[in-house]
Amino acid sequence: MDDIKDKAEHAANFLKGIANKDRLLILCELAQGERSVSTLIEETGIAQTSMSQHLNKLKNEGLVTYRRDHRVLYYRIDHPAVEGVMAILYDTFCKD
């Protein structure tokens, strides 16, 4: 029983990590592929300070990763469960 409780807690923490309007906007963009921070700001309308905080939270939780190209950071989804969940959410809520 402890194993299922641990898994349930892990799942709840995972869902808390993405259960935020701004983070979902970011993940909807990243569901389409890698994006630079400036592109994410432009596409979502999230202020740079807030964007940095949200990306940092997503990164710290292991949901996204980034690469640096000189001064530009590019983010992408880096968690198989996030890819699966966002594919469904993107098809249901994000697509035009």
Image (cartoon, helix red, strand yellow):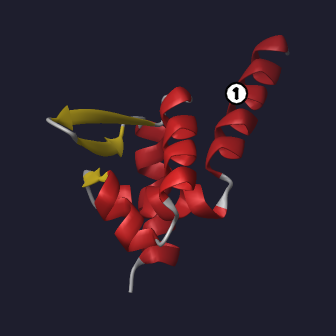
Q: Is residue 31 visible?
A: no
Q: Quadrant of the C terminus?
A: bottom left
Residue 62 in sight: yes
Q: In front: 63, or 36?
A: 36
**x and y percent of residue 84 in the render?**
44, 49
Q: Residue at x 55, y 60 (%)?
A: 24
Percent x, y of residue 47: 52, 63
> To which residue does mark 1 refer?
10
Give the vertical position of 62 relative to 71 (above or below): above
- Relative to 54, residue 45 above or below: below
Q: Quadrant of residue 42?
A: bottom left
* Residue 32 left/right relative to 86: left
Residue 49, percent from left and from top: 54, 51
Residue name at image x 53 percent, y 39 percent: 58
Picture layout, residue 87 above or below residue 79: below
Query: In the image shown, does 61 or 47 lie closer to the viewer?
Result: 47
Give the camera-side residue of 45 and 2.
45
Instruction: Identify which residue is drawn at 46% across, 58% down.
Output: 26
For label 1, the crowd category at 10 Å Cα-Cα, with few meaning under 14, some 14 to 19 and many 20 or more, is few
Residue most extreme to the bottom: 96
Question: Quick one: which residue is furthest to the left in this view?
Answer: 70
In-image side of 55 versus 16 (left or right): left
Position of the N terminus, as image quadrant, is: top right
